[in-house]
Amino acid sequence: MPITYSFSVILEPQPDGGYTVLVPALPEVVTEGDTERQALLNAEEAIRAVVDYRRAHGLTIPPDAIPEIRSVTVAA
């Protein structure tokens, strides 16, 4: 029976449309999609590929890293 993993993702809307997806626990996962649904499906595929790669090479699969978002204001 396969192991189930759950990872938090950051979904960033892009100025010209579409979304970029980042996975804090798996920094090698960066993907995108034209819609939120497509971006999340692409993220699922990318996460699966990274988990498979890590398992095949004996690398650790880290636990989820829940992002914390803060606002920083600067004068420039």
Image (cartoon, rainbow, N blue to C red):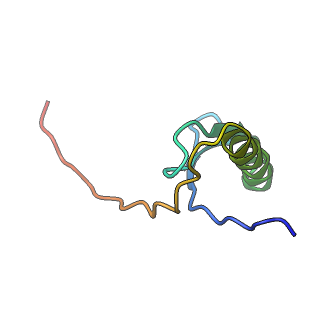
| Location of residue 41 in the rendering, given as x and y in whole percent from the top left corner | 80, 52
Q: Is residue 7 left or right of residue 27?
A: right
- Residue furthest toward the left? 75
- Residue furthest toward the top? 76
Q: Is residue 21 above or below residue 6?
A: above
One can see residue 17 in this view: no
Q: Quadrant of the N terminus?
A: bottom right
Q: Which residue appears at 76% of the width and 42% of the height?
A: 49
| Location of residue 69 in the rendering, given as x and y in whole percent from the top left corner | 35, 59
Q: Quadrant of the C terminus?
A: top left
Q: Which residue appears at 64% of the width and 42% of the height?
A: 58
| Location of residue 51 in the rendering, given as x and y in whole percent from the top left corner | 70, 48
Q: Which residue appears at 59% of the width and 52% of the height?
A: 61
Residue situated in front as seen by the camera: 68 or 37:
68
Residue situated in front as seen by the camera: 54 or 43:
54
| Location of residue 50 in the rendering, given as x and y in whole percent from the top left corner | 69, 42
- Residue furthest toward the front? 58
Q: Quadrant of residue 75?
A: top left
Q: Which residue appears at 59% of the width and 42% of the height?
A: 59
